[in-house]
Image (spheres, helix red, strand yellow):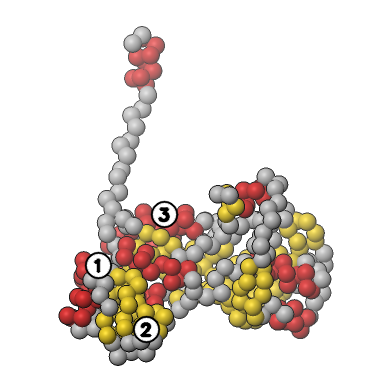
Amino acid sequence: MNPTTEATAEARPERAPRVRVARRPLHGVLLLDKPLGLSSNDALQKAKWLLRAEKAGHTGTLDPLATGLLPLCFGAATKFSQLSLDADKRYLATMALGVRTTTGDAEGEVLERQDVALSREQIAAACAAFVGEIEQLPPMYSALKHEGKALYEYARAGVEIERKPRRVTIHAIDIVDMHPGTVTLDVRCTKGTYIRTLAEDIGARLGCGASLAALRRTASGGLTLEGSISLSALEALPEEQRAALLTSPDRLLADAPEVRLSAAEATRFLSGVRRRVQAPDAPLVRVYGPEPRAFLGSAHVTAGELIADRLLTPPEVQALLSA
């Protein structure tokens, strides 16, 4: 080593040792109130780090522009995350009337802007036309994949990809608030509904154009913002209190009928063996052992037979009972 190199090496500050976070097995559901500007995955990774959880997943993407309910599943709860993905959703959507953008929301470049003077009755009539089963053309600025790439990647490169319309159902649209140039709607819909596209379509029907100015998810299936927590509030808590916010995975099945088994029957059910039960046919039930909180998994009932769909392992059942 020559003197110059040696002097440089001596002057270089030592790197701080990398701190490794010890992960731990956690099981349950965290109702996160996702902040503006973060992707769903970024929010998930932040919560996972704060909880030092080994395994986690979210239950449906919210765009960075959107805020609101993002149920996060940890450990055994990830087995039931699809139930929340498939559930109906509810949003507060604020539309900018007379404003069309390249992306259909506030992140895009403005293509057209005009003054709008519309009555509540006119807007309500336009919204009513979209209640029921409708077809939506997925927007180019979406995470849908084409040949392994997200559509928004093509859109950013100026490439238009042919898309097929999708059938979704809008259960209800109610006007919550109105101000000059904006209207806020309470939208209840099935999974896969593009609220940006709905805003654009309502604007087109009104003849003035519209785009999505803000979006907040308020419910997913039976889960609501009640009891949810923000990332900043989660971070402010002492570490030992964070895990206490997790609720049992059966929260994701709260709307499903309940089947309770004896200890012997519960053991057989956890082995995947079909059981005879006195219960009506149902496409989804939540199954419990003899203890009040002994959630075992999900199943369906056909012709008096209880058939397992997603099962917890015995250690997972015990971990939830001792939580």
Q: Which numbered mark, 1 or 3, is in the foreground of this view?
A: 1
Q: Which residue is mark 1?
A: 313
- Nearest the viewer among 229 and 254 is 254
Residue 274 sits in quarter? bottom left
Q: Is residue 97 left or right of residue 187?
A: right
Mark 3, other Cα within 10 Å: few <14 / some 14–19 / many ≥20: some
Q: Is residue 58 visible?
A: yes
Where is residue 292? Give x, y as percent.
24, 82
Question: Of the residues shown, which amino acid type is indicated by label 3?
Answer: Gln
> What is the secondary structure assignment of the residue under circle 2?
strand
Q: Which numbered mark, 2 or 3, is in the foreground of this view?
A: 2
Question: Of the residues shown, which amino acid type is indicated by label 1?
Answer: Thr
Q: Residue at (63%, 71%) from the top-left corner?
A: 167
CA distance separating discs 1 and 2: 23 Å
Q: Is residue 7 left or right of residue 194?
A: left
Where is residue 156? Give x, y as percent.
66, 47
Q: Which residue is mark 2?
A: 302
Q: Which mark is residue 177?
A: none
Q: Which residue is mark 3?
A: 45
Q: Is residue 96 visible?
A: no
**Badge 2 or badge 3: first in the primary sequence:** 3
Where is residue 22? Give x, y as percent.
27, 50
Mark 1, other Cα within 10 Å: few <14 / some 14–19 / many ≥20: some
> What is the secondary structure assignment of the residue under circle 3?
helix
In the rendered image, the quadrant that contains the C terminus is bottom left
